[in-house]
Amino acid sequence: MVHPLLFLQFFRKLLEPLHISEAGVDAIAYTWLIIVFLLIVSLIATKALKAVPTGMQNFMEVVVGGIENMVEETMGEKGRPYFPLIATLALFVLVSNLIGLIPGFFPPTANLNTTAACAIIVFLSTHVVGIKKHGFHYLQHFMGPIWWLAPLMFFIEIIGHLSRPLSLSLRLFGNMNGHELVLMIFFALAPFLVPLPMMLMGVLVSFIQAFVFMLLAMIYIQGSLEEAH
């Protein structure tokens, strides 16, 4: 069966030798589509910057300014260097969630591979930031405040840190995949009555999940910046 979106067919043919599942290839295709979309929006917004912003520049300044305020309120001034990472993840996750509301499109965040990739980026960034900030003393974050409990605390902390990418990826994947399944079921049962309220719920879910992912990323990175006690 020929898919109505030709770019999906292109990616399926391109990645066919890798024997990736159709769902996985579709997630990769939509991910690249979103990357290109965000790149185009960025170029349009910054093409002719004005002192008094209008159009796309005005819209993006509001969006980026809102994210920047959240980063400062959550992490303080020390979180400013990590604003580009947080903002990129937030915008990518948000657009990935919202694209599923377009008929015929599927959100890449409803695929576990996509959410796991984002979660791993947060996980690695957290520890790279911690090591860069504290050096060898970063290990004290895993030892706890009481020296004779250090071996036990180290084991517990390692489990806690390893569970973070699992929790981040499964939470986002579960919510977005569950929403898509519910949406498909309701569309099959009542295609003419359900769309509007379900679309509104989809927008709400998309924003909430993007916010939660961004908030947890900020909390994890902030934790790695703090001094161990």
Image: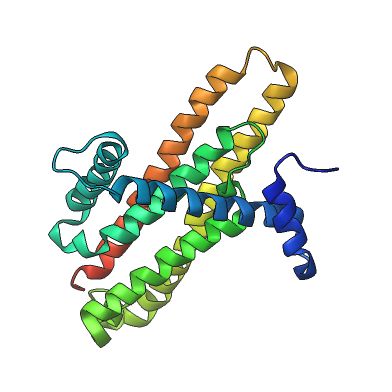
User: Which residue is the extreme one toward the bottom?
Assistant: 136
User: Which residue is the extreme one toward the top?
Assistant: 193
Q: Position of residue 143 (x, y in %)?
A: 30, 78
- In this rendering, would 207 be left or right of 175? left
Q: Position of residue 91 (x, y in %)?
A: 40, 48
Residue in the image at 64% along x and 12% along y? 193
The relative height of residue 66 versus residue 16 in the rendered view (above or below) is above
Q: Quadrant of the N terminus?
A: top right
The relative height of residue 154 versus residue 8 in the rendered view (above or below) is below
Q: Position of residue 123 (x, y in %)?
A: 42, 67
Q: Is residue 163 visible?
A: no
Q: Residue 228's image quarter? A: bottom left
Residue in the image at 63% along x and 36% along y? 180
Residue in the image at 56% along x and 50% along y? 33
The relative height of residue 34 versus residue 144 in the rendered view (above or below) is above
User: Which residue is the extreme one toward the front?
Assistant: 48
| In the foreground, 43 or 184 | 43
| In the foreground, 115 or 29 | 29
Q: Quadrant of the C terminus?
A: bottom left
Q: Is residue 60 visible?
A: yes
Total marks drawn?
Answer: 0
The relative height of residue 44 versus residue 218 in the rendered view (above or below) is above
Residue in the image at 42% along x and 73% along y? 158
Q: Position of residue 88 (x, y in %)?
A: 37, 55
